[in-house]
Image (tube, grey):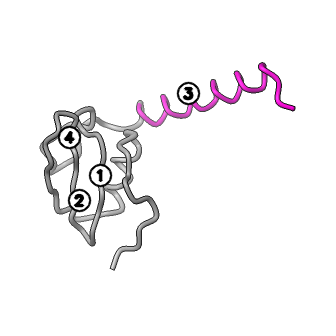
Amino acid sequence: MINQLTIYTMIKSLVLKIERRMNNATDTYPGFEYPAHLLRKFICAVDIFTILLKDGKIIHHRAENTDLFRGWLTAHLVEDIKPGQANF
């Protein structure tokens, strides 16, 4: 059985990993006008991202490099509505 100290250690480790990811990433992405802290969720079809902003507005962005843009979004904890979705 997992004790409280083990749970605390696991949570602390996750928090530190998230903080490191955030410190290593920038809040803005080249060619994209919205900073990461304004983004809530996204979905991608081929190279077009549909993104829900925290204010409820929906925007679209065509990424030159979908892997890099998706990585930037996930590094900033923006939720991928369909993780592992196949790109056709």
- Numbered mark located on residue 53 in the image: 4
Callout 4: few (<14), some (14-19), or many (20+) C-alpha neighbours within 10 Å?
some
Establish if 48 lies above or below 15. Answer: below
Q: Quadrant of the C terminus?
A: bottom left
The image quadrant that residue 82 belongs to is bottom left
Magenta-span inclusion, residue 14: yes
Comparing 17 with 30, the one in front is: 17
**Residue at x 31%, y 37% (from the top left corner):** 26
Q: Are marks 1 and 2 in contact (CB under 8 Å)?
A: yes
Task: Please tell me which of labels 1 and 2 falls first in the chain.
Answer: 1
- Numbered mark located on residue 15 in the image: 3
Q: Which residue is mark 1?
A: 42
Q: Quadrant of the N terminus?
A: top right
For badge 4, the amino acid type reads Leu
Task: Please tell me which of labels 3 and 1 falls first in the chain.
Answer: 3
For badge 2, the amino acid type reads Phe
Residue 78 on image: x %, y %: 35, 43
Callout 2: few (<14), some (14-19), or many (20+) C-alpha neighbours within 10 Å?
some
- The alpha-carbon separation of the residues under discs 4 and 3 comes to 24 Å
Comparing 66 with 56, the one in front is: 56
- The alpha-carbon separation of the residues under discs 4 and 1 comes to 9 Å
Q: Which residues are magenta?
A: 1-22
